[in-house]
Amino acid sequence: MPDGVLRLLTCGSVDDGKSTLIGRLLYDSNLLLEDQLSALQAESGDGSDLDFSYLLDGLNAEREQGITIDVAYRFFATEKRHFIVADTPGHEQYTRNMATGASTSDVAILLVDARNGILTQTRRHSHIVSMFGIRHVVLAVNKMDLMDYSEDRFSEISEAYVTAAQTLNFDTITCIPVSALKGDNLRKKSVEMAWYRGPTLLDFLESLDTLEPRTQQPFRLPIQWVNRPDADFRGYSGTVASGQIHVQDEIVVVPSFRKTKVDRIVTMDADRESAQAGDAITLTFTDEVDAQRGDVIAPSAEPPDSSDQFRVQLLWMDQEPMLPGRNYEIKIGTQKTLAVISDLRYTINVNTAEQVAARTMNANEIGVCNISLQRTVAFDPYESNKQTGAFILIDRYTKQTVAAGRLEYGLRRATNITRQEFNVDKSARAQLKIQKPCVLWFTGLSGSGKSTIANRVESELHALGHHTYILDGDNVSHGLNKDLGFTDADRVENIRRISEVSRLFADAGLIVLVSFISPFRSEREMARSLLEAGEFVEIFVDTPLDICEQRDPKGLYVKARAGEIANFTGIDSNYEAPTDPELRLDTTKLSVDASTSEIIEYLRNKGIV
Ligand code: ADP
């Protein structure tokens, strides 16, 4: 008899009967409370079939009002086993919630409607649960009562599913014909389907052997916070993600790989000799070894890996498509930094399991890509540890979780490539020029006046004896960026390259003037993040669209309106105005001369010129 708790995830579309299935299972197992029972009878009204979905839809209603979290966990127990059901709402944003539920579940129950059979959605759910490491699936072929309990129909669907799921990494696939509404093959064997010789759903769930428990894996403690109430005490707090730890165990702090031993295991109640997965603890060390929030504490004999470049598998969940080259926040356990998708290798067609070449990913697509992080982090491949191998990407502005994924392996560039240290550095180069390097980043619509003003500012600086360089469309789009067009993805890559070049020029000690529409906030912030504090000066050339269009210095608006230019900023492509620029120039009020003076004045005040 397997022991321990079994964690289930139910997946299906809105009307496949997820809520009814779980509701009926609880009812048949006499697991409903009195008040739930009478509410159920009252709600179902006329004495015909009880509406079991009511039991769970109550939860859905709460969720829609934002009262509870996205994934609701329900607990129940039979004589043989305890269960936790991750119940995820079936509507639109289903994959977002599914990914959360899948990463902690042992078994997925995929519901299909016997009338519809296997749908793209079923295949997509299967890919997702496989990706997040669920090894056991149950295909519950529901609504068999509406198909006259047909054995042929069941065989047809289950055979199609088993064939489709062959490429996925499941240890067991169990197809069960059920009627969630009538209770067939949930707890009791169906009289109507005497031809079915397999287990009922509950029999199956009660007897399933699951993976090695988290406590058997190597110890991992992602540090949530450094506990330093006074000068005498320094502890590292968090919830044990996996494994066990004892006082005096030899440990290592990753990614610094500094070694020490556990001195004390402190908990809310008292000191302990040992702790295990799930426990909230504070560790102290025998030596003065510095660790910080986000680091992972592990046994020195079995440490996690560290890297800043990864091959990953990703589920894109946002309605906005993924943009390679854009900076996203990445969260791996308690570690947070920035990540860029450096190379999208392919996406997966869930219907055929084929790998498809792609430049972007849309909502609910699965893909494989390389990501590059701003700093080195501790990790385990997801395959060996779900806690330290999972990550999410967060949009920096909307704060939405846009993707969830698994780290497959580190690409090891961090350890193989070391930066060459040069004797002459940025400040030495700048000193010789008697100036402070900086980047003046002009952003605004086409025709707003970026080039005109930048040109005038450069002349002024040059006259004052400063060493400058201007980057604008003309000297970049014909060379460095000639392979890029004007799609959102290309614009992101365009600005990424310009940012890197302006960083190099600033490193050369120059005052760099960048004149690009640079329509997206994220990329301008990325450019800023490459430089030291105070070096990036964002100048918003704020000219309304109608004025730009009247000026139309290059005749581009006329062409865009005539439909000859696609993706034109302000017309059929978005411009995200800066919210907090260093300088904002309203060219409807300021002449070119006045704008130039304002910029020079700013640079003087900051001691740059
Ligand atoms: P961008 O580089 O932003 O695409 P340009 O500098 O090429 O814009 O074009 C701006 C046009 O607007 C020029 O023809 C410029 O002479 C004209 N203009 C008129 N008034 C102003 C002003 N106050 N500031 C900047 N440009 C102005």
Image: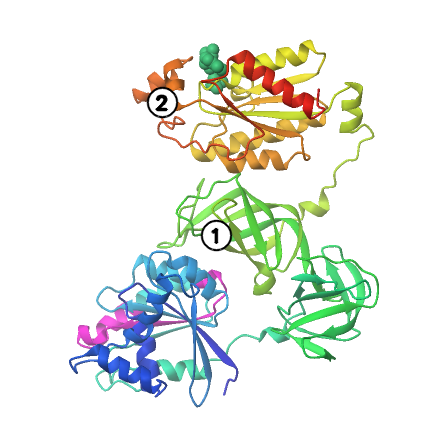
Indicate the position of residue 590 as horizontal and vertical percent values.
50, 16
Indicate the position of residue 270 as horizontal and vertical percent values.
71, 79
Residue 403 tag number: 1
According to the picture, the residue beneath numbered tag 2 turns out to be 565
> Can residue 229 be seen at all in this image of the molecule?
yes
Q: Closer to the camera, 19 or 233?
A: 233
Q: Closer to the camera, 461 or 369?
A: 461
Q: Closer to the camera, 61 or 601?
A: 601
Residue type at numbered disc 1:
Ala
> Can residue 197 be seen at all in this image of the molecule?
no
Q: Quadrant of residue 97?
A: bottom left
Q: How many marks?
A: 2
Q: Closer to the camera, 7 or 188?
A: 7
Inspect the magenta stretch and tell me whether residue 307 lies in it.
Answer: no
Q: Which residues are magenta?
A: 129-158
Does mark 1 have its CB less than 8 Å from ligand 1? no
